[in-house]
Amino acid sequence: MTKTDSALKADVTNELIWDPSIKETAVGVAVKDGVVTLTGHLDTYAEKDAAIRAVRRIDGVKAIAVEIDVRLSPSHQRSDTDIARSVELALKWNASIPPDSVRVVVDHGWVTLQGEVDWNFQRGAAESVTRILKGVVGISNDLKLKPKALAADVSQKIEEALKRQALRDAQHIQVVVAGDVVKLTGTVHSWQERRAAEGVAWSARGVRSVVNDLQVV
Amino acid sequence: MKQDCELKQKVLAELEWDPAIDAGPIGVAVEDGVVTVSGLVNTFAEKAAVAAAIDRVAGVRAVALEMEVRLAIPHRRSDGEIAASAEQALRSNTLVPSDAVRLAVEKGCVTLQGEVPWEFQRRAAERAVATLIGVVEVRNEVTLQTSGQVANVAQRIEEALGRQASREAARIHVAVEGTTVKLTGLVNSWHDRDMAEAAARAAPGIDSDQRVAECMSCAEPFTSIPDPSQRTAAIEREAAPVSRG
């Protein structure tokens, strides 16, 4: 059973109200054919990110278009030099990110992360520590993964991990490995499971890219 | 017991699989679905990764983390250095209200104190320091401010669950007793359980009693149906102030 657009819009709006980390009055919601468009201005990048996550949580959302820009409040304004310094400090002090592996470029509050790390969770960690910093209005995560020998039987190992984690839809997920690219196709029941399945695929040694074509039904 | 043996194999496989974990020095014992992990980890972040990895495995009823964080030499920092970096991490964090959280560091253990309006801010403060180099433990003693009782909290949590996953919501029961939210029922996976818990955590204006903060932050205890073939996990959260690790 699919939700109507107006029911979906009500759900998205209520979820934004429900989430205390989002100033929901600043966000406009439009829904057409299950595609949710968010518009407006928010104070921080973390808040923009929270708004996107809130929409992802909702049953029946097919896709999200984000037309929100970040307009920093005066108390959060920082020079690019200050932002670069605080990103560098945050990266340097993070226990999961290898030292000196990430280069930081800041342009009008937009942070680009460049370089090579060993694992996708380190890419994620670099982005997480940056996302919440004052002055950041956006992030381009251009971190690449170092090439590594692909683990043997990758697709089988990914399938085993999906089963171990009791992903309800494990049997509906097809795993195809081509070179260092893993492609996931099939259906899952929620965005959480879609993300979890992607996380599983990223954990395979040697995988440098995951194409997540899982449909949420 | 056969089931325990299988569960142990699964837990070991999941620890091996997770690239954030060096599984070599970690020992795993399982009895009646209760997993005890012991041994050494290199960082506090790794300890958290171990806890999360075990949580993901189907059939785990409870977890005891008897691990010691032994920092590698390049990760050792003085308490003064840790305090300075933790201060900076809190100050530059957009989610943590300015000057709301105080911190103290002793032998790498960071204690956070203060008062914030929301649970997400409390957790943001914890996350901001938990990943720092040199940290071996975090004690989050930040409490939530009084925001006054909001009407129909249980109903609002149920609505939030319904928005997020209508199939599961019908099988989850929400009870609010004073300062405690208790979720019971069956879900299909641990991911669904996490989703339900996150929805409850976001509940606004539940009574400001200290116990709410404790309760809302604890990940354990959970109970689950030990038969993994059923692919179900019961959600049950008690008010007991159990903190992870």
Image (tube, rainbow, N blue to C red):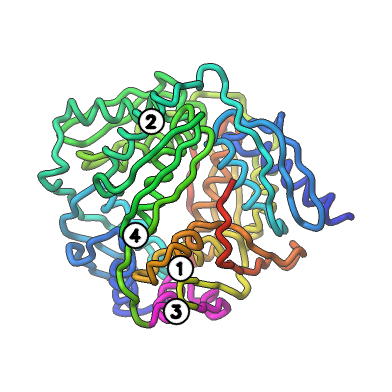
- Chain for disc number 3: B
Looking at the rendered structure, whether the residues under marks 1 and 3 are on a common chain is answered as: yes
Q: What is the x, y in percent for residue A110?
A: 21, 36
Q: How far apart are marks 1 and 4 (CA)?
A: 13 Å
Mark 4: amino acid: Trp
Question: Which segment is the magenta one?
Answer: B152-176
Q: What is the x, y in percent for residue A133?
A: 27, 39
Which label's residue is closer to the chain start, 4 or 2? 2
- Chain for disc number 4: B
Which residue has dot 2 on it?
B83
Q: Is residue A169 visible?
A: no
* Residue A18 in magenta stretch: no
Badge number at residue A128: none
**Depth check, front residue: B193 or A147:** B193
Which label's residue is closer to the chain start, 1 or 3? 3
The answer to whether the residues at label 1 and label 4 have Cβ atoms under 8 Å apart is: no
Q: How far apart are marks 1 and 2 (CA)?
A: 32 Å
Q: Give SS at disc 1.
A: helix
Q: How far apart are marks 1 and 3 (CA)?
A: 9 Å
Q: Which residue is drawn at 48% across and 49% down?
A: A212
